[in-house]
Image (cartoon, grey):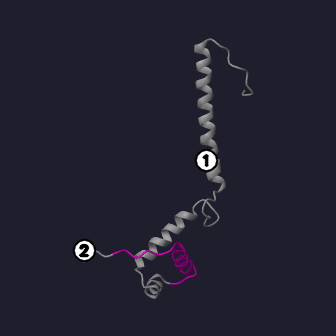
Amino acid sequence: MPMSQKSRKRYTAEFKAQAVELLEAGRPVPELAEELCISSNLLYAWRRAAERAQVGSEGPRAVGERDEADDLRAMRRELARLRQENDILKEAAVILGTKPRPNSEP
């Protein structure tokens, strides 16, 4: 790596979460940034990212955990896909000259 390029320092998710918690507790951004030896802009970015992660849920989610809105969206997509497949099968039955089975749909 040439001397003119600096390597970026990586921070753990736990460090970022703790910094955001301190901000939410009322610590001023410039003061906290100086204490943690990071830029104020970085703290603001972490806070924005944490706020985006919490939108639509009661709080931060664990890895792999989904909220009800996500489940509902997934189920609606699956329902639309299944209805489309069903319509295709009905059309194929008409083309092939077979009668589609009666179903429970109104």
Front residue of 58 and 75:
75
For label 1, the SS is helix
Residue 73, label in figure: 1
Q: Magenta segment: does it hold 66?
A: no
The amino acid beneath tag 1 is: Arg
Q: Which labelled disc corresponds to residue 2?
A: 2
Residue 103: x and y in percent read: 73, 25
Q: Is residue 95 above or below residue 44?
A: above
In the displayed structure, does residue 66 sit left or right of residue 11? right
- Span shown in magenta: 7-27
Please say whether residue 17 is one of the residues in the magenta stretch. yes
In the rendered view, does 62 fall on the left or right side of 31? right
Q: Residue at x 31, y 76 (%)?
A: 6
Q: Nearer the viewer, mark 2 or mark 1?
A: 2
Q: Please state, as top left, top right, bottom left or bottom right, where the C terminus lies in the image.
A: top right
Residue drawn at x 73%, y 21% is 102
x, y percent for residue 17 = 55, 74
